[in-house]
Image: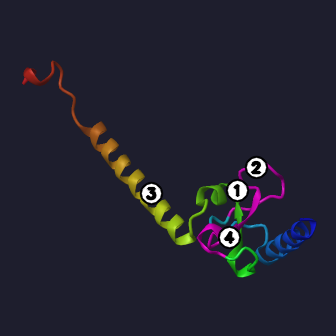
Amino acid sequence: MLERQTNWNIMRKYIVKRDGLVCRACGAEVTLKRFQPNTLHIDHIVPIAKGGDMWDETNMQVLCGACNLSKGSKTMEEWEAQKAAAAERDRITAMITQEEQAMPLFEGGPNAL
């Protein structure tokens, strides 16, 4: 177990040196401090649960904690599609809200006309 942990620490340092302290998804600066929204995470681009190689450095990237926790066990493509769908949903909701706010209100209810 100690050897595996040592290997992971070496791999983690290599990925950080390669990618720098910048989230590859959102561009935010990441920190080595724990328990922060922008804490450094090493993400498997293709999740291990979906057949990604745990030790292949081309399958790893630096992400901030917020992005990595949002991505979860999705591939980057799945995660991007999820974010795009959420953004479209938010856009439509905002449009509907604006239309509702622009609608005139009638006093006396529907029979007042």
Q: Could you say which disc has been placed on residue 44 in the image?
A: 4
Q: Secondary structure at mark 2?
A: loop
Labels 1 and 4: the sequence-earlier one? 4
Label 1–label 2 contact, CB within 8 A: yes
Labels 3 and 4: the sequence-earlier one? 4
Q: Secondary structure at mark 1?
A: helix
Report the mark closest to the observer, 3 or 1. Answer: 1
> Picture coordinates of residue 93 (x, y %)?
36, 47
> The disc labelled 3 sits on which kind of residue?
Ala
Q: Is residue 62 left or right of residue 50?
A: right
> The disc labelled 2 sits on which kind of residue?
Gln
Q: What sort of colour scheme is used for the picture?
A: rainbow
> Picture coordinates of residue 85 (x, y %)?
42, 60
Location of the N terminus by quadrant is: bottom right
Q: Could you say which disc has been placed on residue 87 in the image?
A: 3
Q: Residue furthest front?
A: 1
Q: CA distance from mark 3 to mark 4?
A: 24 Å
Report the mark closest to the observer, 1 or 4. Answer: 4
Which residue, given by chain and number where applicable, does mark 2 sit on?
36
Q: CA distance from mark 2 to mark 3?
A: 25 Å
Q: Identify the residue at image location x=73%, y=67%.
A: 22
> The disc labelled 1 sits on which kind of residue?
Gly
